[in-house]
Every structure is written in structure tokens, then in C-alpha cells.
Image (cartoon, grey):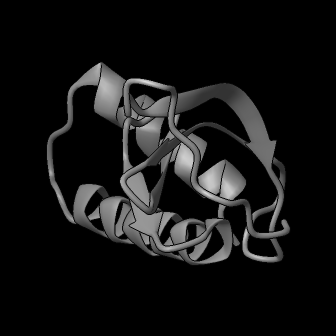
Amino acid sequence: MPAAAPATTAHSQPLTVPLLPVSHESVREPVPVLVEFTEGQVIIVDAVTGVFGSGDDAESAISDLLAALRDHLDLLSGEAALSPDLRKQVEYLRRHLR
């Protein structure tokens, strides 16, 4: 994904781009994300788990997001008991991450 320049509105409010699929060599199938550009940062939020990554550009934000998703999966996988919603997140992450 090419790096995108941060953008804000006339009132310096964050600009949010809703639900874009992110494809990367580290994922089996595209991950639906929200993208926000604010104060020189790109923030990418996984739409299913709420886990996010940030960086100075889109590439670094995607890398940060993927690392955070892996950490989230590792954390959840180590738990003996999970709520139904968290079990769904584990299934989702295992299905999407390589």
C-alpha cells in the first residue's frame, strides 16, 4: 500500500476513511480497517477487534497494526477461558493472520 500524506479538515479535525480492506503478505485475506490521518500520524484500526496501529506513514502504521494483532492473538490464545466475543476474535485472527 503506498504511503499516504496525512490530511486534516479546515478545523484540524482528524480525517477518517471508513472500512478499507488491507492486504499484506502477513495476512491470508484482507482485513477490514478504518484509517485516520491526524497530526502527522496515520492510525489504522482493525474494524473487527478494535486493535490499532500507528505510524508516520501508511506502511509503518500497517506494520504496527499487524504486530499488535499478533500480540493480541498471542495474549488471547494464552487464556484458559474467553467470552464468546473474544473466542470469535481468536477465530478471526487465526483465519486472517499467517
Return the x and y of residue 70 as percentages of the image width and height.
Answer: 44, 70
Q: Residue at x 23, y 64 (%)?
A: 75
Location of residue 63 by image quarter: bottom right
Q: Residue at x 37, y 35 (%)?
A: 87
Q: Residue at x 68, y 26 (%)?
A: 19
Q: Identify whether 57 is placed above or below 36.
A: below
Q: Identify whether 80 is placed above or below 82.
A: below
Is residue 80 among the parts visible in the rendering?
A: yes
Q: Nearer the viewer, residue 17 or 83?
A: 17
Question: Which quadrant: the C terminus?
Answer: bottom right
Return the x and y of residue 65 as percentages of the image width and height.
Answer: 49, 63
In the image, taking residue 28 as reference, residue 42 lies left or right, namely left
Q: Nearer the viewer, residue 50 or 72?
A: 50
Return the x and y of residue 26 as percentages of the image width and height.
Answer: 73, 75
Is residue 48 among the parts visible in the rendering?
A: no
Question: Which quadrant: the N terminus?
Answer: bottom right
Q: Residue at x 38, y 24 (%)?
A: 11
Location of residue 94 by image quarter: bottom right
